[in-house]
Amino acid sequence: MGLPGKKCSVTAHHGDSRNPASQDELVGKFRFLTSDVLGEARTQQVIDTVSRLDSLDDVGELTGLLAGK
């Protein structure tokens, strides 16, 4: 719903590849969505693990955190 007589257009929603969210925004959203489920400590562990995902020997480290193991 817009205002009568006003035009607006969105070329790329925030978070789109043409209008990306910042790393801090993504981490903040992840914390907001997961802290109640995973707890603060495990949420931070997941964030830390994802930040070094390309150097993990075994992705099981990440999946274990997400599964609560």
Image (tube, rainbow, N blue to C red):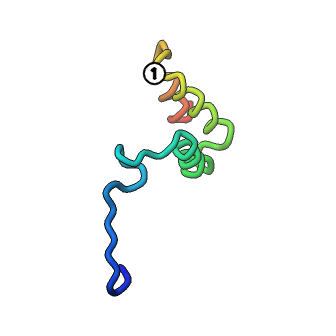
Q: Position of residue 18 (x, y in %)?
A: 35, 46
Quadrant in which the N terminus appears: bottom left
Q: Secondary structure at mark 1?
A: loop
- At 56% from the left edge and 26% from the top edge, which residue is drawn? 49
Residue lying farthest top? 57
- At 55% from the left edge and 31% from the top edge, which residue is drawn? 65
Q: Position of residue 36 (x, y in %)?
A: 62, 51
**For mark 1, does the 10 Å Cα neighbourhood hold few (<14), some (14 to 19), or many (20 or more) residues?**
few
Q: Is residue 43 above or below residue 13?
A: above
Residue placed under numbered mark 1 in the picture: 59
Q: Position of residue 55 (x, y in %)?
A: 49, 15
Residue lying farthest right? 41
Q: Is residue 3 above or below residue 35?
A: below
Q: Quadrant of residue 7?
A: bottom left
- At 49% from the left edge and 16% from the top edge, which residue is drawn? 56
Question: Does residue 35 appear left or right of residue 57 in this picture?
Answer: right
Quadrant in which the C terminus appears: top right
Q: Is residue 8 above or below residue 57?
A: below
Q: How many numbered marks, from 0 up? A: 1
**Residue type (three-letter) at the residue carrying disc 1:** Val
- At 58% from the left edge and 42% from the top edge, which residue is drawn? 24
Question: Does residue 56 appear left or right of residue 18 in this picture?
Answer: right
The residue closer to the viewer here, 54 or 22, is 22
The residue closer to the viewer here, 49 or 21, is 21
Q: Position of residue 68 (x, y in %)?
A: 56, 35
